[in-house]
C-alpha cells in the first residue's frame, strides 16, 4: 500500500566531522539526500547540471568582463553564482560553482579559459617525461582552499534551504584534458597514451586519484553534503579500456573517501556520472556510490533492471528537450518519471544546461518533476 504524501518521511542521521564548522543552518529540505539513500520522498527531487550558467541573464551580467578562473578563485563570486538559480527555481539541491580543471591547476599546470574555444592548456602533457613537471604532492588546503571557502560561505548563505553538492572531475577525464590541451572529439592524443604508455597512464591516473580523494574530503570538511564525480569522457573509451583506465580509479575514489569519512561518523552520499558509459552500468552500480547518474542514451526501465536496485539513479532527460514547448516538456517528464519510478530517483538532465536555453523552460521542467511525481506518489 502506498503511503499518503503527508505520511512520507525520510530519516537520515548525520554526524558532523570534527573539523566541520558546527554552526551551519539546519537543513529544511532533505528530499535530495533521502533519494540518494533510496528512501521514500514526498516528491522526486530535481536539480540540473550547470544550473548556474550562461542561460541565466543574471549570470551573464555578473560574469561580464571577468576572467573565468579568477571568478572560480573568489569565494564570494562562487557563492553568488551558486545561489542565483535557487532564487529563480525550487531546485532540491545546489551545486557549488567551480570547475573540474582546478585540479590540474593545483598540480602546476596552466589552464586558461579562452573565449570561443573553452578551457585551454598552453603546455599540455606530451610524453611520459612530462609527468615530472607535475606537483607530486598537492596541499589541497593551500592550492584549493578557495573552493573550500566558497563551500562554507555558500552553505551558510543557503540557510538550510537545500543541500549543497561538491564535485570533481574523474581521473580519466582530467587526464584527457591535460594531454589534449582542451576539448576534443576523438581524444586521440590521450588515448595514444593508454595504448603506447600504459604504465605512465596509470601513474598519472593514480596521481590524480590521490589529489581527488583529498580534495573531496576537504569539500566535505568545508560543508558539502553530497559529492558528484564527473567522468565526462567515459564515452570515448571502449568497455575494455574503461575497465582498466577508468573504473578502478572511480572505485578507489569512492572507497577511500568513504573509509575516511566513516572514521569520523560522516555519511555523505556520492554520485558517479559517466557520460556515454552505458556499457559500464552494471559495474558502476557496484562501485561504492549511492547514486549513478545517467545520460539520455539509456532507457529508464532498462537502467533500473540493469542496476538491480543496488543504487539510486539520477538523470536523464535530453537537455535539448528543453527547447520544446512547455506542454511537451511536461509530457516528457511524466514519461521519464513513469520509467524510473519515484523512489531512489533524482530527476536531472542527461548533461548540463546549454547557454541558449530559456530559463522559463527550465522552470517548467522543475515544476513538471514536482507535480507529476507527487501525483504518482498518491496512486
Image (spheres, grey):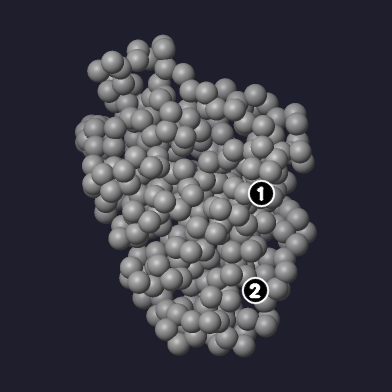
**Image quadrant in which you'd find residue 241:** bottom left
Name the side, left or right, on which 166 lies relative to 335. Answer: right
Rate crowding at label 2 as few (under 14), some (14 to 19) or many (20 or more) other CA atoms within 10 Å. many
SS state under label 1? helix
Rate crowding at label 1 as few (under 14), some (14 to 19) or many (20 or more) other CA atoms within 10 Å. few
Q: Report the residue at 53% width, 41% height from top.
A: 269
**Image quadrant in which you'd find residue 215:** bottom right
Q: Quadrant of the N terminus?
A: top left
Q: Report the residue at 49% width, 49% height from top.
A: 288
Task: Give x and y (percent) for residue 146.
Answer: 72, 52
Q: Nearer the viewer, residue 117 or 276?
A: 276
SS state under label 2? loop
Name the side, left or right, on which 110 lies relative to 350. Answer: right
Name the side, left or right, on which 190 lies relative to 152. Answer: left
Whether 104 is drawn above or below 16: the answer is below
Task: Give x and y (percent) for residue 42.
Answer: 40, 21
Give how far apart the Cα atoms at labels 2 and 1 are: 28 Å
Q: Return the residue at label 2.
A: 109
Name the side, left or right, on which 306 lies relative to 228. Answer: left
Q: Return the residue at label 1.
A: 260
In the picture, the disc for residue 279 is none
Amino acid at each position: 500500500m502506498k503511503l499518503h504524501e503527508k505520511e512520507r518521511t525520510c530519516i537520515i542521521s548525520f554526524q558532523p566531522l570534527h573539523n566541520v564548522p558546527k554552526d551551519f543552518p539546519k537543513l529544511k529540505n532533505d528530499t535530495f539526500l533521502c533519494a540518494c539513500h533510496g528512501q521514500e520522498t514526498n516528491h522526486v527531487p530535481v536539480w540540473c547540471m550547470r544550473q548556474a550558467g550562461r542561460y541565466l541573464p543574471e549570470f551573464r551580467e555578473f560574469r561580464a568582463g571577468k576572467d573565468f578562473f579568477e571568478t572560480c578563485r573568489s569565494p564570494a563570486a562562487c557563492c553568488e553564482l551558486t545561489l542565483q538559480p535557487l532564487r529563480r527555481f525550487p531546485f532540491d539541491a545546489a551545486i557549488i560553482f567551480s570547475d573540474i580543471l582546478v585540479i590540474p591547476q593545483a598540480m602546476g599546470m596552466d589552464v586558461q579559459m579562452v573565449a570561443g574555444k573553452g578551457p585551454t592548456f598552453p603546455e599540455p602533457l606530451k610524453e611520459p617525461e612530462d609527468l615530472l613537471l607535475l606537483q607530486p604532492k598537492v596541499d589541497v588546503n593551500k592550492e584549493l582552499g578557495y573552493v573550500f571557502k566558497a563551500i562554507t560561505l555558500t552553505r551558510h548563505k543557503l540557510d538550510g534551504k537545500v543541500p549543497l553538492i561538491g564535485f570533481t572531475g574523474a581521473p580519466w577525464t582530467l587526464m584527457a584534458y591535460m594531454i589534449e590541451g582542451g576539448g576534443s572529439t576523438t581524444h586521440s592524443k590521450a588515448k595514444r597514451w593508454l595504448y603506447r604508455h600504459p604504465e605512465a597512464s596509470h601513474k598519472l591516473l593514480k596521481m590524480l586519484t590521490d589529489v581527488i580523494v583529498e580534495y573531496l574530503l576537504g569539500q566535505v570538511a568545508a560543508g558539502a553534503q553530497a559529492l558528484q564525480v564527473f567522468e565526462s569522457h567515459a564515452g570515448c573509451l571502449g568497455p575494455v579500456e574503461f575497465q582498466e583506465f577508468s573504473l578502478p580509479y572511480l572505485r578507489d575514489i569512492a572507497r577511500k573517501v568513504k573509509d575516511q569519512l566513516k572514521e569520523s561518523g560522516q555519511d555523505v552520499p556520492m554520485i558517479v556520472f559517466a557520460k556515454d558509459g552505458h556499457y559500464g552500468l552494471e559495474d558502476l552500480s557496484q562501485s561504492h556510490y549511492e547514486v549513478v547518474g545517467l545520460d539520455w542514451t539509456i532507457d529508464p526501465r532498462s537502467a533500473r533492471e540493469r542496476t538491480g536496485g543496488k543504487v539510486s539513479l539520477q538523470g536523464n532527460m535530453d537537455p535539448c528537450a528543453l527547447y520544446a514547448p512547455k506542454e511537451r516538456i511536461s509530457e516528457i517528464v511524466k514519461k521519464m518519471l513513469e520509467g524510473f519510478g519515484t523512489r531512489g530517483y533524482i530527476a536531472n538532465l542527461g548533461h548540463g544546461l546549454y547557454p541558449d536555453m530559456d530559463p522559463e523552460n527550465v522552470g517548467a521542467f522543475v515544476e513538471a518533476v514536482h507535480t507529476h511525481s507527487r501525483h504518482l506518489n498518491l496512486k
